[in-house]
Amino acid sequence: MTTTAATDAEESGAHPRFAEALRALGLEELLARTRRFPEATRTAAEAAAAIGGELSQICKSLIFAADGVPVLVLMDGASRVDVERVRAELGAGKVTRADAAVVRETTGYAIGGVPPFGHRTRTRVLADRSLLAHDVVWAAAGTPYTVFPVEPKELVAHAGATLVDVREQHG
């Protein structure tokens, strides 16, 4: 890792690997907007409280296993992922929530700090359309204490995500 990325990461509070990924993607401006909080932003509710925003403005980065293969699902913080919809979208036989070890192995980050991109390995990425309801959403910056704001369309593009409808429907 370059010294500059390490310095940027220290200043922003972002995880050094995520800072390096942003630099590689030419997205240093996202690093400059990263905010570190003294209280954890591990859950969508904690992150929304920290930024003073709505739960649905938080982008959760969730790892699932589709027939044993990790897949990243980006979901707004107020919604839950419908694994049956994910299964149908991927044409998989079985979709389950990945355990903490698989999340860390796949992304390089711990649950509660997984960013929407800049992972250790390339995975298939699905982004729920609900994220597009906002001008700006907030996502983890690689640690349970840091988040960054990003336009949803920019988020989808940088994550290499396919837009889908995979949230639980109520009513």
Image (cartoon, rainbow, N blue to C red):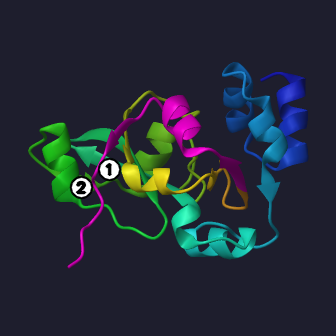
Above or below: residue 126 compared with residue 148: above
Give the residue at x 63% y 52%.
136
SS category of the residue bearing label 2: strand
Q: Is residue 159 visible?
A: yes
Distance between the alpha carbons at the discs numbered 1 and 2: 6 Å
Left or right of residue 36, residue 141 in this image:
left
Q: Is residue 120 visible?
A: no
Query: Is 156 covered by the magenta stretch?
Result: yes
Q: Residue 143 appears at what percent x and percent y?
A: 68, 53
Q: Nearer the viewer, residue 169 or 133?
A: 133
Left or right of residue 34, residue 161 in this image:
left
Q: Amino acid at mark 1?
A: Phe
**Quadrant occupied by the N terminus:** top right
Q: How many marks?
A: 2
Q: Residue 83 appears at what percent x and percent y?
A: 22, 57
**In the rendering, which numbered label is found on residue 96?**
2
SS category of the residue bearing label 1: strand
Occupied quadrant, residue 44: bottom right
Q: Pointer 1: what residue? A: 64
Q: Amino acid at mark 2?
A: Thr
Give the residue at x 80% y 55%.
35
Left or right of residue 40, residue 62 in this image:
left
Q: Answer whether labels 1 and 2 touch (C-beta < 8 Å).
A: yes
Give the residue at x 32% y 50%.
64
**Stretch of the chain drawn in magenta:** 147-171
Counting residues from the N terminus, which is met first, the one under dot 1 or under dot 2? 1
